[in-house]
Amino acid sequence: MIRKVTTKKDLKRFIYYVKTLYKDDPHHVHPLFFSLKKELADEVLKKQDYTALLCLRDNAIVGRILYTVDESKKQGKQVGYFSFFDAIDDPSVAQELFDYMEQDLLARGIDYVEGTFAPYDPDTRRGVLVKGFDSSPVIFTSYNYAYYGRLLEAVGCKKAIDTVLLNAQVNKASLKRLNTVSKYFNRSHDVRIDSLDFQHLDRDLKDVHHVLDEATNEIVYQDAPSMDMVETAARQLKMFINPDLIRIARENGTDRPIGFCLVLPDYNQIFKKTKGRLRPLAFLLGKKKITKARGMMQYVVPDYQNTGLIGHMFKVIYDEFERIGITDFEAGTMMEDNPKPINAFKKFGGEIIKIYRLYGKELGK
């Protein structure tokens, strides 16, 4: 039986379902439940931009899905997007969830759906994990059982595109390669690499948006985030930010912003222990013991692409890694059809360790 989430009680059941589903999995990391409740209460119950479904058997939850409608840059039309797909290993559960979602979307004139992908948060929890089940997810990446891909294919979904996550080691060899790239870049460019400045946050966010807007091109899956989205993301991420790991490249003399890197410490190392709860003392003490970081975003404006600027920015960030004790770095998730950043990370020792798949389905056929 499918139940549409319309009450706080059902939304709570929707959010906490993963505690039951993944209770015996050694790698799953619960989300920050208090933050997720606030986020979904706004999207599902208040604004009703998103629809949340539960699949029930004898009143016990056996599956869930969240979906919405938004503009697709790639397809040039309104399409459906689904996320928070979780279910037991039973094709009939996935079929029930998709049957309800598809009927609703078709009634609204939508003939294509894709996921897992949340348009309001395009760099978070993106894709279904299809490779790399042997380690815990880094902050804001997804994790799921290996059978999810099979369930989605059983309901008619097909691969739309893959995203990849690379592991770039933090060691003397990688730093040596970055130093070489950085020296080469500095010979012909007069550029500085600034940390995010909370005292001038409005200016920095505008510069970040400028870089994102310029760097977006035809091979990027979505348009650059709007200024409102950039500001919203900054507010949501504030508690996780180390400003010295967020770097904006600017030309000296003109102050023109030309590149941007967003790296976050892997707070999942803390949240795995707190089981989705934010414990202030554990958070404060654990921050100093984090040994891994994730590169969330890295963008360079077109006229500085292929110049070594990405390597130059990450040389500065790697210096900071050494200072704060980061020994492992994961970069991604990057679209497979955008090879420039992937190749850039491979040049200084990166290798693909996880693959996330976006699935799509034509509706009504």
Image: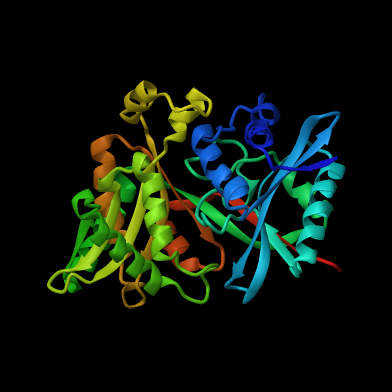
**Residue 60 in the image, given as x and y percentages of width and height:** 79, 29
Q: Quadrant of residue 23?
A: top right
Image quarter of the C terminus: bottom right
Position of residue 104 in the picture relative to residue 198 (left or right): right
- Residue 82 in sight here: yes
Q: Nearer the viewer, residue 103 or 249?
A: 103
Is 55 situated above or below 204? above
Q: Position of residue 211 (x, y in %)?
A: 34, 68
Report the side of 326 relative to 167 (left or right): left
Q: Quadrant of residue 181?
A: bottom left
* Quadrant containing the N terminus in the rendered view: top right
Q: Nearer the viewer, residue 239 or 243?
A: 239
The x, y position of residue 4, in whole percent, is: 75, 44
Residue at (36, 37) in percent of width and height: 327
Q: What is the image's colouring?
A: rainbow
Q: Horizontally, is 53 left or right of 121 in the view?
A: right
Question: Residue, x 76% and y 69% (percent of image)?
Answer: 111
Residue 318 visible in rendering: no
Residue ID at (51%, 54%): 121
The correct choice, above or below, for 43 with respect to 190 in the image is above
At 63% across and 47% down in the image, what residue appears?
129
Count of numbered badges drawn on the protein: 0
Q: Position of residue 126 (x, y in %)?
A: 57, 52
Q: Residue furthest left?
A: 253
With respect to residue 51, does 187 lie above or below?
Answer: below
Q: 291 or 82, which is in the foreground?
A: 82
